[in-house]
Image: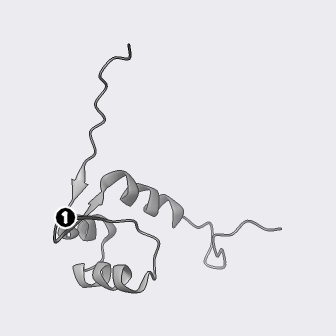
Amino acid sequence: MQPNIKIQTVLLTPKEAAARLRVSESTLAKWRMTALRALPFVKVGHKVVYAEREVERFIAAQMRKSTSDNGREAA
């Protein structure tokens, strides 16, 4: 029998996620509507929330080494 392991997911409101990303809440809303950025979100009823770990992954994916770095590895 496996032990009962609970994984706690920290959920952020759009306001909290926007503050972490240093963008406006309306920017997050535009990203959701247009899929302009690949930031996963969760709908809980009528509310939108973001998993903290996804926000952190999104930030890590945006890291660049120079302004000419488009984030893709050279072939």
- Camera-nearest residue between 53 and 7: 7
Residue lying furthest top in this view? Answer: 1
- The image shows a total of numbered marks equal to 1
Residue lying furthest front in this view? Answer: 1
At a point 31% along the width and 54% down the height, the residue shown is 52
46 on left or right of 4: left
Question: Which of the 4 quarters of the picture holds residue 74?
Answer: bottom right
At a point 73% along the width and 65% down the height, the residue shown is 73
What's the coloring here? one colour
Question: Which of the 4 quarters of the picture holds residue 46?
Answer: bottom left
Element marked by disc 1: loop
At a point 30% along the width and 72% down the height, the residue shown is 22
Image quadrant holding the C terminus, namely bottom right
x then y, percent, for residue 14: 22, 70
- Camera-nearest residue between 14 and 19: 14
x then y, percent, for residue 21: 33, 68
- Write down the residue under mark 1: 13
Question: Which of the 4 quarters of the picture holds residue 20?
Answer: bottom left
Q: Which class describes the residues within 10 Å of circle 1: few (<14), some (14-19), or many (20+)?
A: some
At a point 37% along the width and 60% down the height, the residue shown is 55
Residue 64 lies, with reference to residue 56, above or below; the image says: below
Q: Which amino acid type corresponds to the residue marked 1 in the rendered image? A: Thr
53 on left or right of 48: right
Residue 3 lies, with reference to residue 15, above or below; the image says: above
x then y, percent, for residue 34: 41, 86
Image quadrant holding the N terminus, namely top left
- Camera-nearest residue between 74 and 13: 13
- Camera-nearest residue between 55 and 8: 8
